[in-house]
Every structure is written in structure tokens, then in C-alpha cells.
Image (cartoon, grey):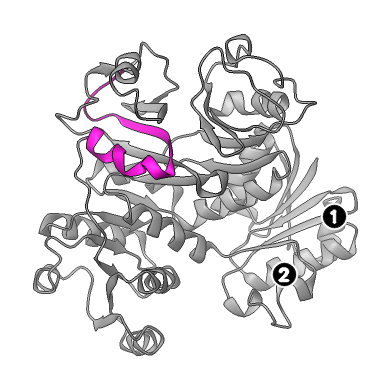
Amino acid sequence: MKVLIVGAGEVGFHLARRLSEENQDVILIESDPERADFAAQQLDVLTITGNGASLPVLERAGVRGARMLLAVTSQDEVNLISCLAASRMGVRYTIARISNPEYYERGSVLSREALGIDLLINPERECALETYQLLHSAAANDVAQFADGRVQLLGVVVREGAPVAGKTLAEIGAELDEFHFVTVAIVRDGQTIVPRGSDRIETGDQIYLLSPTVEVNSIPPLAGYDHQPLRRVMIAGGSAEGEYLAELLEHHGVACTILDHDRRRCLELAEHLPRALVLHADATDLELLEMEGVSGIDGFVAATGHDETNMLSSLLAKTVGARKVVSLVNKFDYLPIVPKVGIDAAVSPRMATVNAILRYVRRGRVLTVASLKGIDAEAIEFNVTASASVSGQVIRDLHLPHGSLIGTIMRGDEIIIPRGDVEIRAGDEVIVFALPDAISEIERRFA
């Protein structure tokens, strides 16, 4: 499939790399010559320097032969015009990254339906939703939902003294056979392991588990965490992400305090969020954090527009005694740093955008895709058809590529933990965890 990507920022660069690794024909358009040159050197894609909203540039990129255009620059208007032009020039599917709510509210003359664009992605809303999910798990530093919310993928760090520490997966499975989670990855010393039964979980490991959502609350104690209800959250920063998160918290009855250094922004937030406490304050003021009761607070979210400020305020909140600290991080390069400095979890609007777009690009037989923060791996949910090569085979005979495993199988209302003698059937929804080198082969066999 020929895919045009407008914008070689972190979102466009990451999408181009992912799709080119899957043997898609990717053309990347970037207006900044230096950024375009960097992408050309780093990626196996055709890179064109120019404005993606320009008809001659789109023509030069071969837009008339493309099946899909992804407009992911940081400028809403460029993204919209690129999609509109591409649609008029015969591109079948168009996706735009959009932050301004005027462009995606239903009934607006500029809505997705009115403009004829297939998908509008709002990074800030996607990020706020992920943050809310993270706050609801005492242990998780990464989270994704599958099977219409019936299955969750959780990333947790194993604490010292945890019941699973020092045991092999086979031993854990024998001792905890009443649970239905599957360990799909272990990250140790920066290396990602797709484990087998003989692999051992150690203290300090970052592990990723697939679990039925109804059993998710049983996972934190196994990794050494106590379950904590979510009653009170502080948000440092009145950004769009912070505002959307506050809306979610208010809707679910969670008490919310918002800090922002801009007095005018505080007045706007106070008017829009009547049940939230809005304070005109600096999120890096340690004395203020102590005075406002951050010690023992259920959740602290750093959501300013600056990564460095977010990480600093997160560290201060953790020092003061906040139970769960989540930092908003825009730069992909910062994501692996977050757990190393003691912050519980990171959320990335850009990574959320990538995941949302990949879900759409692979839609149909691929139901859900989740790229994991800090490691190069994906969890992919497939709808198995009768024509798929895996249909009718038992798992032990599949001989999946190195760096992949089946995590969970949904068959109707039943959630099946994969064993060697389980048969894959047409109609099954199968979640597969895979490292980059295995993704192409996995998609070929399952989709």
C-alpha cells in the first residue's frame, strides 16, 4: 500500500519507520529541509521537501497513486488542507492530526463529516484518556485496552518481595492457576525478552501482562503493590491535556485540583470546571506542593507544555509523597528516562497519536494496535478469518517467529489463555505481542 505522510516531526517520523518496516510504500513530505534530510538518512522511505498542503508538492509525491494520506504536522490547517487536497485527487483514505476542538465537534461546519476526512485524531484527548486509565491502576506505568475493553495490557515494575519475584513463568502459572493473565514481555537492563515458561522474573523487571479487565485489580499485589482507590488527583498545568483529564475526573466523581502559573488560564479553567479547585501557582514550588497536601494524594499528573518542567514537578511530587505520579512527555527520547528517575509513568500525546493512527491504518482484520512506551514492541489484536493461515491450527504447530507470542484469545464471550493444544479458529480475536522484526510475518499469517 502506498502511504503519504505529511510532516516528519516525531509523529510522522515514527509512523514512517513503523510502516516502512512492514513493507509499506511510504513517501514522507516535510517542509523543513534539515528535518527532511535527517529523515532521508535515517529511514528507508522516499522523502520530499516541501509544503504538504501544496498541490505541486503532492503531485510530485505521487498523490494520485496513493491509497492513504496521513497529515500529522503540528499545524491543524496544513493537515486539513493536505487531506482535502488529497481526497480531491483520488486518495481513498485521509487522516488528520487536529488539536483545535472547533475542527472535530459534531455539527461544526469544519467537522470531520463536513470536510469528508476519514479520521481526525486529537492527541490531547487521547493522552488524557490514557492518563485516566493509568491513574486507576496503582501499579501500571503503561496501559492499553483490547477486545472492546474486556482485556487490558498492563506494564508494571516488579518490587522487592513481590510474590512473583524470583520465580519462572512456569512456576507462577502453576501456583496462580486461578488467575488468567499472561506475561508477554520482560524488560531487563534495556533488553526486551519475549518470555517462555523457563524465563524468570526478577526484582526490578518491567513486565507486561495481558489480563481480563475484571481481574486487573489482582495484578498489583502480585507485583508488590497495594490496591488504592482513586479519590483525589492534582494536575500541574492547565494544558489541553490537563483540562481534558480534569473533565474525565469530574465526570467520575474524583476530586481534582489544578495548578497553573498563568492567571488568565486559571480563570478560564475555573469557569469551565466548576467542581475543580483551580490555583494560580507554580508546579515546581515545593513548599506549595506540601501546603496543598500532595503527600499521600492518590494521583499527581504533570501536564504543562514543557517536558523538563513536567519531569521536575513529578520528581518533587514523588519526593513529597504522592502515591502515583504521571508525567506528560512529548519527546520520544525522554520516554525511556522516566522510570529510571523514579517517576511512576509517562504519557505521550505523540505516541497516543501514533497508536490511534496505526489502529486505523491496520483496521479490518486488525482490531487494535498498541505501541509500548520505552520499548520497540507492539501488541496487535487480530480478527482471524477462515482464509488466515493460522486458522484451524493448534498453537504448538504455528511455529511463530522469534520475538512473538500469543497473549490472549477471545472466542465469543470466552477469554482463553493460550496453551499448546488450543486451536485457533475463524472468528477468534487473538492478541499477539511482537518485536519489530516479527511484526510483518505475524500480520501476514494472522491477517
Q: Which residue is mark 2?
A: 80
Q: Is residue 85 left or right of residue 125?
A: right
Which amino acid type corresponds to the residue marked 1 in the rendered image? Arg
Q: Which residue is mark 1?
A: 92
Which amino acid type corresponds to the residue marked 2 in the rendered image? Leu
Q: How many marks?
A: 2
Residue under the point 51% across and 33% down: 377
- Above/below status of 337 relative to 189: below
Start-end of magenta stretch: 200-223
Give whichever of 59, 99 is nearer the camera: 99
- Marker disc for residue 351: none
Q: Quadrant of residue 421?
A: top right
Decide whether residue 127 is among the magenta residues: no
Q: Earlier in the sequence, mark 1 or mark 2?
A: 2
* Coordinates of residue 397 in the picture (x, y in percent): 62, 9
* Coordinates of residue 234 in the picture (x, y in percent): 25, 68
Q: Secondary structure at mark 2?
A: helix
- Circles 1 and 2: CB atoms closer than 8 Å: no
